[in-house]
Amino acid sequence: MSTTVTAARPFEPVTPTDERINYLNAQYGLKSWLLTKDHKRIALLYLGSVTLFFLLGGLYAMAIRLELLTPQGDLVESNTYNKLFTQHGILMVFFFLIPAIPAVLGNFLVPIMIGAKDLAFPRINLLSWYIYLVGGILTIWALLSGGVDTGWTFYAPYSSTYSNSYVVLAGLGVFINGFSSILTGLNFIVTIHTMRAPGMTWFRLPLFIWSHYATSLIFVLGTPVIAITILLLALERLAHIGIFDPKLGGDPVLFQHLFWFYSHPAVYIMILPSMGVISELIANFSRKNIFGYSFVAFSSIAIAVFGFLVWGHHMFVSSQSIYAGLVFSFLSFAVAIPSAVKVFNWTATLYNSSISYDTPMLYALGFIGLFAIGGMTGLFLASMGVDVHVHDTYFVVAHFHYVMVGGTLMGYLGGLHYWWPKITGRMYPEGW
Amino acid sequence: MQSWIPFPDSASTFAGKVDALYLYLVGMTAFFTVLIAAVIVIFVVRYRRRQPFEIPRPVAGSIKLESVWTVIPFIIAMSMFVWGASVYFTQYSVPKDALEVYVVGKQWMWKVQHITGQREINEMHVPVGRKIKLVMTTEDVIHSFYIPAFRTKADVVPGRYTYLWFEATKPGRYHLFCAEYCGTNHSGMTGSIVVMEPADYDNWLSGNANQESPVAAGQRLFTQTLGCASCHKEDGSGGRGPALTGLLGSTVRLDNGQTVTANEDYIRESIINPRAKLVAGFQPIMPTFQGQLTEEQLLQLVTYIKSLSPGKSSGIETTAPARSNNPQTGPATPEATGASSVDAQRSNPVGATPPSAATSPRGTASPPASRQTGNRPRQ
């Protein structure tokens, strides 16, 4: 639980050398951290583990790039390379991009921003972190045992019947990790609904809260689908029950529907919190309220809702009905509009403002530029005629790296810098 | 589209359409990206903080502005959608009069079978200026047949046929890639499409003609190896089993009252899983041949059975129509595009075969358009 500051004379001026009680020094010792219920401490626990997985995923990325320096397969052999990109994807998507901002910045800031003492379920918050760790350890165990080579998308029947790698073990790690997401989402939704301070109405909430609310909706509604999909995959792999492999009576395209039904909303899980951070950064460093607050707030909700309706745009060439494809393409264009509206509103915020070039602002500006490019390439992919040509090529890889690195990572790092003083009590060196 | 732009060659009839759409998208997105970037740069410089404690005047929102920059992007997005959908329908509407080539993907190679008997591995020779339809499947995992120069690709999915079509516009050798990760040697699963002038293609055909055509191979399987003839008769006219003559493109009534349209996928499914769609009036006595046939043998059988319906097509051109080949309840509806007018009820083996062109000789089976089933219920 959070600690309260008790100064002897509460209104005395405070110098930086005053030793006040805060969440960092209220209790010492490993147990006080590992058994904490304080949302701020849990956020720091996540910071440590999320950073670890980010670095691990980054190592795999470096290995990929080293191999790709030359056209020949001269650094690693084919099977190893297949494991490298699979594991880079799994670690980055499930253990960094999805949890990072909600679990680190969200956990820390959501109660503070709405005037609550902590989240609605502090113990469940801690449980979320432990579940994340267990999932992560299982996945690392799979990697160390020999790795998984199915691609992070685990397409069947390769993953259910043909792959000779640790699919079930890695899948189990991802499955367990999903519960961490679900519980965090649950926590945020209940907290935002029930624990706002008196007078904190919905339309006075910071846009950071709106985006985390929208993200939590996706957490709670979408994650169970990937959980069950992984279970079905494991069932087929272990018990040879025919679900996806046609030789057992299954349908391989069913896997794709189930997988993408979660994994598309998942990418909105990755970007929405980052957009929330950007809203705060732009507003703060231009000393103005975000232009069009309610439009930005509604855009977050719209992205979350529409995001559930577009999964088939990953399947335009996979023998999906072309008429279903039409619907998915239309809705994919529709879901681009709220993102565009946000970019325009951020830009309008800068008009007639007072902009300072602090590090978080540089990250925010970098976000807008890189996310704009990444989002624009998304339009190419939503347009079915072009998608037939560029699907399953590096065009897609480029698109999602722009939005994930240029989008999510920029928001994460910008937010970390911006709230660093709040988190640590210290200012980072600005550099100039 | 070559020269200085690193574009792949544009070598099919719809490649130019894809490229035009692509250029439109590049133009629109570049325009807006530059616009947004310029505006931001200008603002960031113009409104930089000059005094440490200055506070700008707050600006009220503007519904008008919000509407403008919601509606205009939406209209632009819709233009991209409509154009994209139109190009997509061109790419995925398989024409009825196309020359068929069969493709079987397998870890980690492409096996190509021509209707005239030629077999190729990782290469496909086709004539220029002729519509080609690929009927494809895979023996193991999902692959994807991708010809960048033709701007088209389609996944090959185990357990069903998928379709692709193109008409090459200039002779040459064009890259073929596998575009769906399929295991160890996915990146090595490449090949070539060799487009030839008609004369050269004929030469190539005759130079490689000493192989059995799939129709003949299928006939051998049907009448000798597998014993299909025992229930369907030597000529496919049916007995204990339904007639197969004139089957392609016709509407079949099932025992549960629903109807399906017979296309390649239906035929293939009935061989692998006969109980899935039991024809009305027949006993469920056909054994399954799953596990006894390779995908290539299945293709040969299907091709032979198709040859028993000369001059027929399965009607719909698109690769995956709205009404999938799921059984339809209610009265049988003949398929839309002038398909056969065969009796809707195929409950008795005496299905009238419509008068057709002279039975095609071995090898030149009529080029029916066929329809791929959508998601089929597996029950």
Image: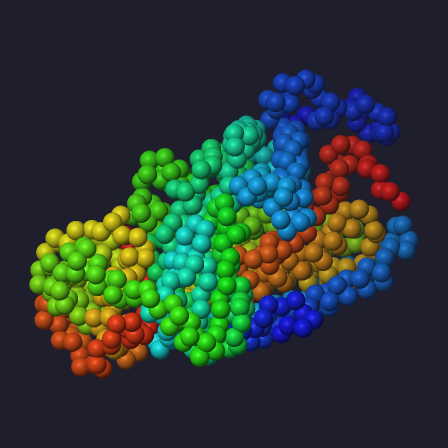
Rendered image coloring scheme? rainbow
Using residue B358 as the reference point, say whether residue B209 is left or right of it: right
Query: Which of B310 and A194 lies nearest the eye of the viewer?
Result: B310
Image spot of residue A66 (x, y percent): 67, 44
Image spot of residue B16 (x, y percent): 55, 76
Image spot of residue A1 (x, y percent): 62, 26
Q: How many marks?
A: 0
Using residue B133 as the reference point, say whether residue A347 is left or right of it: right
Q: Is residue B81 above or below residue A226?
A: below
Residue A188 seen in the current view: no
Q: Residue at x 76, y 41 (%)?
A: A417
Q: Residue at x 69, y 19 (%)?
A: A27
Query: Which of B355 and A307 lies nearest the eye of the viewer?
Result: B355
Using residue A337 as the reference point, say whether residue A3 is left or right of it: right
Residue B71, quarter of the rendered image: bottom right
Image spot of residue B97 (x, y percent): 35, 78
Q: Residue at x 58, y 65 (%)?
A: A380
Residue B377, quarter of the rendered image: bottom left
Q: Residue at x 61, y 62 (%)?
A: A377
Residue B357 seen in the current view: yes
Query: Which of B362 and A353 lies nearest the eye of the viewer?
Result: B362
For the C terminus of chain A, the image quarter is: top right
Residue B242, quarter of the rendered image: bottom left
